[in-house]
Image (cartoon, rainbow, N blue to C red):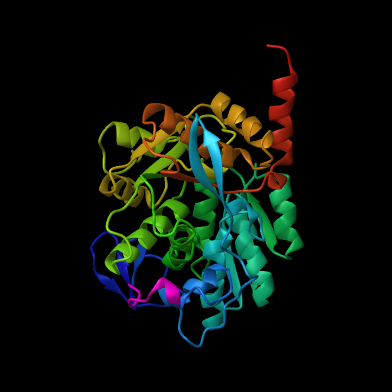
Amino acid sequence: MEYRCTSTGQSVALSPHTWKSPQGAVLDLAFRPKPFSLADCQALPPNLWRYRAALPIPPEAIPVSLGEGFTPLQTLTVEGVPVQIKLDYLFPSGSYKDRGATLLMTMARYWGIDEVVQDSSGNAGCAIAQYAALANIGCRILVPEDTAAAKLVQMEAYKAQVTKVKGNREATAQAAYQMAQHTFYASHVWNPFFLHGTKTFAYEIFEQRNGQMGEAWVLPAGNGTLLLGAYIGLLEMQAMGWITRLPKLIGVQAELCQPLAEAWTQGKAQQDAGYHSHQATWAEGIAIAQPQRGFQMLEAIRQTGGAMIAVAEADIADALLELTQQGYYVEPTSAAVFAGLKQYLRQQPATNQNQVVSVLTGSGLKTTEKIDKILQQQKSPA
């Protein structure tokens, strides 16, 4: 097993402290699981580690785990169409980022790492801090200064050292790059082990839907950790003969920060290097103006015949309220994906029931202040 430079395709030696290629590009993990069958997994506990045969983990590595995964797959009627939605906000830390964090921190402990650094707009930082606490590994999290207060409290409760960085999300990343020169970089963006944790999303859907993957999956497209993980999982299952075709991957961004949606509309292979967002969006979790793996997200969407969607702030707020009225208390970023799902169904209605899959990614308990603002706006006269 080794890393692969996404720019040149050259091999890069696997090392705990290597997080980018000599050319400065993001790395992929040159890994494909040995063929196995679903029957091999079904006798194991109902969590994401039942797919360990698909994970790039040494046999002797002991999982840093809280029994996470195998989240419910609920059927909802959206725009008159029954669709299935994965409830990934029910993970221990309150978001799907636990999928990647459990695997990445398992590798960190296996490598003997005693401290990690991470940059995050919130959920990834909470997940890494949680598993760092479980593994008894020191943790430093860098966050934008406008990160939701509840997420900061959660990280600090795990005894992570949290530092607010002045400026936008990209400024936070730049600060983390400096620290990563001498500290293990537990990045959900740069470290490809994280993506091999989030790919379990695809394996769970295969099992829960009895191998029927549907026509389209509508997913968030911020840094792409879920979308790209899902794509990796789908490619692996196709290579093993579990599935013959891939569902369309539909990426969702907010209109106020839509570098990939704009690139998609313009037929470009990656986002404009000069793109930056001017206004804050309700969907802070996907407000990434310069996603490092943007070109990979666009390629995954292109290869599956998918599309990019951008949603308005009013639609995000309406989607949040619609979800709460059905009992789903999620953060606005999750509501943005639901708004994208609604838009997709209006544009290309599914011909058959349960042919579209989507996800609710983060708990509303993490963004109480934002949700309160949305509720107050709804009460105010026009």
Left-right relation of 275 to 371: left
At x 73% / y 64%, what residue is drawn?
A: 158
Q: Quadrant of residue 267?
A: top left
Residue 47 is situated, as x and y percent measured from the top left of the image, at 57, 68
Q: Can you say whether 353 is above or below 42 in the image?
A: above
Q: Can you say whether 38 is above or below 305 in the image?
A: below
Residue 307: tell me if it is visible: yes
Residue 9 is situated, as x and y percent measured from the top left of the image, at 24, 65
First to last magenta residue range: 32-39
Left-right relation of 356 to 327: left
Most common secondary structure along the magenta stretch: loop
Residue 179: tell me if it is visible: no
Residue 162 is situated, as x and y percent measured from the top left of the image, at 68, 58
Left-right relation of 79 to 23: right
Quadrant location, the C terminus:
top right
Quadrant location, the N terminus:
bottom left
At x 44% / y 78%, what residue is drawn?
A: 40
Q: Can you say whether 158 is above or below 1 in the image?
A: above
Viewer-closest of 69 and 243: 243
